Amino acid sequence: MHIDVQIKYQNAFLRELIEMTCEDIKIDDEEILQDLFYKPDNQTFTYNALFHSSFKTIHIRQYIIDRLLTQSISWEDIGMRWDELLAWSHHTNQQRVVAHNVWARIREVSSKQFEIDKLINTENDKMQEKLKIIEIIPSCLDIYCSDATDKQHYKDLLQNIANSFTEKIVRTVVIPNEIDQFVPIAKRLDPYSKSTVWHLFRQQPLTLLPSATDTNVEEMPNPTTCHGLLTQADKTFDLFTAQLNDICTNWKTLSVSSWIHLFPDKRYIDYDLGILEPLLDAVVTPILKQILDFWTGRENLMCLCQGIVSLLTYLKVPIDDETHLLFDSIEQLDKTKTGDDFYKVCENFYKNYSNKYLPQILNLIGRYKASDELITFLHSLAATDADNLLEAVNDWDETLISTKTVLDLVLIKTFLDRVYTKIDLLRKKQPIPDEIHRVILCFEEVQKDDEFKSIIQYFESCSKLLSSIKRVYMDLTNKERSKRRRIFDIVQKVCFGFVRLPVNTHGRIEYRFDVFIKEQAMYYADLSELCDRARLIEYSSNSTNKMKKDSEQEIRELRFFVGMVAVIETILTNLTSLNMTSHPFVLDFLSPKTEFTCIAGNYQK
């Protein structure tokens, strides 16, 4: 064929050779459809025979055209099979182009204006309609007829229909009357089969259904059969749509108790309203959602209101009458209120809070109620208490409280301190109008810092472990009081002497100088630890500006103690140095009779 093209089809011998070769080629209907319909490919012999100029006068081209024309007439007269429609729908873009070229050529060479796309769309619509029936009716049988005595009979009929699609032409697949009678009900109920609202409505007492004595109501079919149960579900759906219509029409005057019970789970409110959208008034639906969100989240809202009150009380910020009125109206909302009552309160709250602030900020403010015990505890901590906790927790069993928990606690303390500092700065500059909202904005500004992005999680974790945190804090406080008492006892009256102690260093005995307080069995290491604590106590008293007149003497004694330990440290250093130079009088300090005293802070001997 390539040579034939090069010589522009002018060689009679070559043309005759091609024709003789094609006479020996046998091509059947299956191959034609495979190459030009099921898997259309422009590289096949069948395609080239139909389009290449070398085959223009050869009988095999006419044979292919005749077979495709016959097939198209058959499709138009009796319809197409399921596998044929499926093959067409699965064509790639390239295959679709090849197929369209084939049928365009058929239209060119014949008087028949065959539209393959139109035919396939028509046949596919018929198939999809029947497939939809065998899809939705089993679902309806499972949902509404689970206890029907004849359920399996209908399931078998539906399975037979499904099987016939693979064996018959789509047009010849017949839906039996037994199944067809369910189609209108199934089509009506199927879109709402996943709605929890609809299924909750169905579970209400059967007295909601029309009375059997009503002359306008047809006699109900046997309630133990699929027909009877589906008919009953259909009539219940009438009542359901009527109630939804009543809610949409009269939501302002109806008490919310008449309908909010249909939405028991706030996680599915949006989902259900989306499913029920065709049955609802598009204008009213957002209002119903707002009321439902407000009702299901009322506990969090009340927690927020009480949190704001607690925060403002702590800050000594007065609450204005408008805010009092809003918070009271939220607290008074119950199921007896009308939809209009709810909506007005919703709008007021959203305008003043939800639309102004991020949810995490409002959640933080709500912690003044939800985590009130934790916040009260944090308010009682001095600046150094948190540091002491962090230092002490390393000595505790991790099963009681972890270092991370204390880190979280310290972070919350830091966060609150920064917020309060920012609020104080604002209030010192000038009186703040609309003070509640300026306070909330301070929380918002501080929370923007990266270290506080997850602060709400720390509130939750620390609240759960508050009892353990308090236990560590109380034990730490008791220990600190004990250390303080020991410091004061030493300053008031103590006798001590210097000793030389043997120390095993890598298997070798060396001697180290130390100080020993016999009454309390203490050495220099113990004094050094108490010295660190004395410095911390003194710093805490100075930094918090809480030194009272009756504690001034204690502060002086703490300073005496720090000074005494410094002198002892110097003596030990000097003894070590003198001993290294073999000074002859070093051992005089170690005589059992050589004692030093500290009485009322006087350690000058």
Image (tube, grey):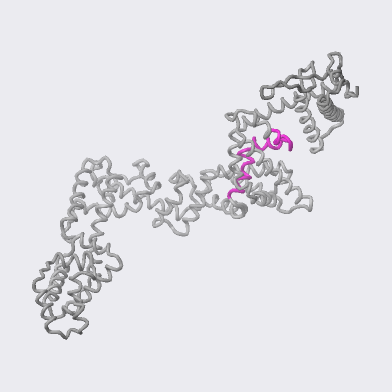
The quadrant of the rendering that contains the C terminus is: top right
Q: Which residues are magenta?
A: 359-388
Query: Is residue 22 among the parts visible in the rendering?
Result: yes
Q: Residue furthest top?
A: 593
Q: Residue furthest bottom?
A: 10
Residue nearest the viewer, comparing 602 with 192: 602
* Left or right, 44 with reference to 566: left
Residue 133: x and y in percent read 25, 54
What secondary structure is the magenta-colored segment mainly? Answer: helix
- Number of labelled discs? 0
Residue 411: x and y in percent read 66, 41
Quadrant in which residue 494 is drawn: top right
* Left or right, 77 with reference to 292: left
Quadrant in which residue 143 is drawn: top left
- Let me know if residue 386 is in the magenta part: yes
Residue nearest the viewer, comparing 332 with 377: 377
* Left or right, 92 with reference to 392: left
Query: Is residue 550 among the parts visible in the rendering?
Result: no
Residue nearest the viewer, comparing 436 with 344: 436
Residue nearest the viewer, comparing 289 with 238: 289
Above or below for 301 versus 105: above
Residue 529: x and y in percent read 75, 28
* Left or right, 112 with reference to 400: left
- Residue displayed at 75% across by 47% down: 424
- Let me know if residue 588 is in the magenta part: no
Residue 231: x and y in percent read 27, 48
